Image: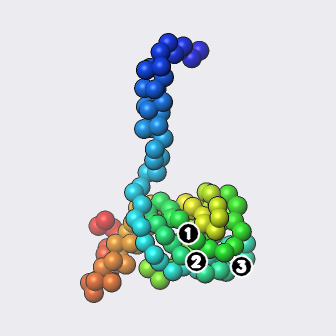
């Protein structure tokens, strides 16, 4: 049974504690980017723009209807293609969760960054 709240101060403390827990439930920090991408959804391809990215997922702008649970393929120069699932969609943007393990996505990002800087690809076994 729920504890009864006996004062306004206690209520405010509980609300602030709850807000702190819910502020950001993501497991990975997101990085703001502007990466061109092609999004394959429901057998159609459309051009898109990744506006933030993490090893666990991304926020993408594209002009196709998407619903929560839709499976998509995100194709980009930086990381080739990644399978993903739509978590939310609103006003031309969608939040997707990558199917590939975040550690593998992070290794791909590291390898792509090494190539961009003229170095050899990073060894995923050493990341």
Q: Residue at x 42, y 60 (%)?
A: 30
Tell me the number on the disc at residue 48.
Answer: 2
Can residue 98 be seen? no
Could you tell which of marks 1 and 3 lies nearer the N-terminus?
3
Could you tell which of marks 1 and 2 lies nearer the N-terminus?
2
Measured in 3D between alpha carbons, the distance from the residue under mark 1 to the one under mark 3, in whole angstroms, is 16 Å
Q: Residue at x 27, y 87 (%)?
A: 118
Q: Residue at x 41, y 55 (%)?
A: 28
Question: In this figure, which residue is indicated by the disc labeled 3?
Answer: 44
Measured in 3D between alpha carbons, the distance from the residue under mark 1 to the one under mark 2, in whole angstroms, is 7 Å
Q: Residues within 10 Å of mark 3 (few under 14, many from 20)?
A: few
Q: Residue furthest bottom?
A: 118
Element type where label 2 sits in the image: strand
User: Closer to the camera, 100 or 52?
Assistant: 52
Asked if the residue at tag 2 contacts the one at tag 1, i.e. Cβ–Cβ closer than 8 Å, the answer is yes
Can residue 6 be seen? yes
Element type where label 1 sits in the image: strand
Taking the image as shown, residue 101 lies to the left or right of residue 29, namely right
Q: Residues within 10 Å of mark 1 (few under 14, many from 20)?
A: many
């Amino acid at each position: 049974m729920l504890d009864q709240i006996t004062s306004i101060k206690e209520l405010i403390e509980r609300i602030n504690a709850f807000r702190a827990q819910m502020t950001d439930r993501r497991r990975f920090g997101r990085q703001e980017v502007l990466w061109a991408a092609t999004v394959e959804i429901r057998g159609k391809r459309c051009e898109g723009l990744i506006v933030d990215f993490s090893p666990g997922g991304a926020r993408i702008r594209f002009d196709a209807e998407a619903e929560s649970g839709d499976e998509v393929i995100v194709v980009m120069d930086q990381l080739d293609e990644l399978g993903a699932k739509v978590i939310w969609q609103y006003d031309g943007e969608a939040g997707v969760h990558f199917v590939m393990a975040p550690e593998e996505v992070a290794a791909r990002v590291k390898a792509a960054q090494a190539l961009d800087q003229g170095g050899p690809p990073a060894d995923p076994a050493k990341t």
